[in-house]
Image (spheres, rainbow, N blue to C red):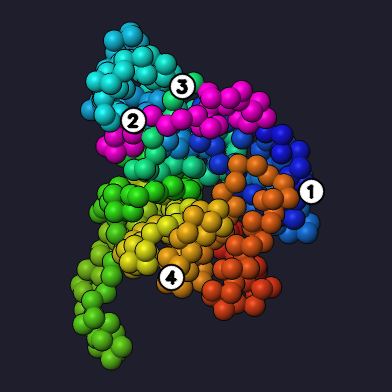
Amino acid sequence: MASIAGIPDMKARALTVMSTRAQDQDLVSDVASQQGIKDSDIAMSSDSPTNDRIIPCFGWHPWFSYQFYDDTPTGQAYDGTPSSKISHYDKVLTPAPSSKDTSFSEGLPDPRPLSEFLNETRSRLEKHPLALIGEVGLDKAFRLPQSTYEAQRNEGLTPGGREGRLLSPFRVQMSHQVAVLQAQLRLAGEMGRAVSVHGVQAHGVLYQTIAALWKGHEKDVMSRREKKQVARGAEDFSDSSEDEDEDDARTGSRDRRQGKIAGSDPNKRAPQPFPPRICLHSFSGPAEVVKQYLHPSVPATIFFSFSIVINWATGGGDKAEEAIRAIPDDRILVESDLHTAGEQMDQYLEEVCRRTCKIKGWDLREGIERLGRNWREFVFG
């Protein structure tokens, strides 16, 4: 929190600031009210006010997804009693805490209804028209921290993080993480907002989770035979009007699947059950996963972001470089993945920009301009 005041002095022209849990939703909203980018047309330009630096993002990180109970018609019941609280955490955590230590669940927050958070997020997105949804996702590796601090907590940090606490043996059930993630992705689709997605040791299930939402909305992909026919000029433009009507019917059906509104602004997107744009942040998957997301039938625009602290500092540099080479030039983003702003963030951003440009063979100025265009396309569409 203490680093927020230094944002206007940073070299970085714009920052996408993520929320992750209960304690930082209003904090991000408040900072955006003071330093938020107001106009997408002049974002990152020299004409933009110095203090307008922030694109706020509202979401619930998978590390904290256990704090919700799914109150959808097919979800679980929770009546607010101590026994119901223990039952909730036995259901969404593995192993079930009551099988190890009942006091662990007793020390956790009372669970909240997922629908309540979704309504709050919808209100925040309406308040901030340029805001995104994030950080959300899936994480197989994360374990909940113990409730007690080994040392006095740092009052300069937003409450609710690990802050050096020892880890427990408990993880969030993947089925529960999926339910929380899909609910937020649907909200992004409803409101036409981009999403920043976290994925750790879950590349396969993450793709399946996202793809399940666009099932039935895939783009039409021409077969090799159809492409050859078009290339050879095989279309007969003297066909009957009946054939043309059939073509128009197929086109209308495709437009409806892809969210276009007949007779409306062609740039306006109808609500969909999936987000229009997705960033896989600090992407750690192999090049094969990149190909899945870039298949021509995928109806969302997928970006891949990289950071020094995750992609290189943890020893995954070779895999990151292979993925970067496989990603089209217009789908790459960079980030710091730090929780504090200021000089260190600028340094990490500069380093990841330089590395990305070197891997892609870009001139530094050309690369910075390209990465800026990619960011604007991801955020504003």
**Residue 209: mark in rendering:** none
Q: Earlier in the sequence, mark 2 or mark 3?
A: 3
Residue on which the image places disc 4: 322
Q: Quadrant of the N terminus?
A: top right
**In the image, residue 49 lies in the stretch drawn in magenta:** no
Give the residue at mark 2: 170
- Residue 198 higher or lower than 82, as above or below: below
Q: Nearer the viewer, mark 2 or mark 1?
A: 2
In this rendering, which labeled residue sits more in front, label 4 or label 1? 4
Query: Of helix, strand and loop, which one carries label 1?
Result: helix
Query: Above or below — where is 367 with respect to 62?
Result: below
Most foreground residue, 200 or 215 = 200
Sequence order check, earlier mark of 2 and 4: 2
| Residue at position x 23%, y 76% in the image | 223
Magenta highlight range: 149-177
Q: CA distance from mark 2 to mark 3?
A: 12 Å
Q: CA distance from mark 1 to mark 3?
A: 37 Å
Nearer to us: label 2 or label 4: 2
Horizontal side of residue 221 vs 38, given as left or right:
left
Q: State the CA–CA distance, disc 4 to disc 3.
A: 40 Å
Q: Position of residue 329 (x, y in %)?
A: 51, 71
**What residue does disc 1 label?**
9
Q: On the picture, is 302 further left or further right than 30?
A: left
Give the residue pinned by disc 3: 147
As helix, strand or loop, the secondary structure at mark 2 comes to: loop
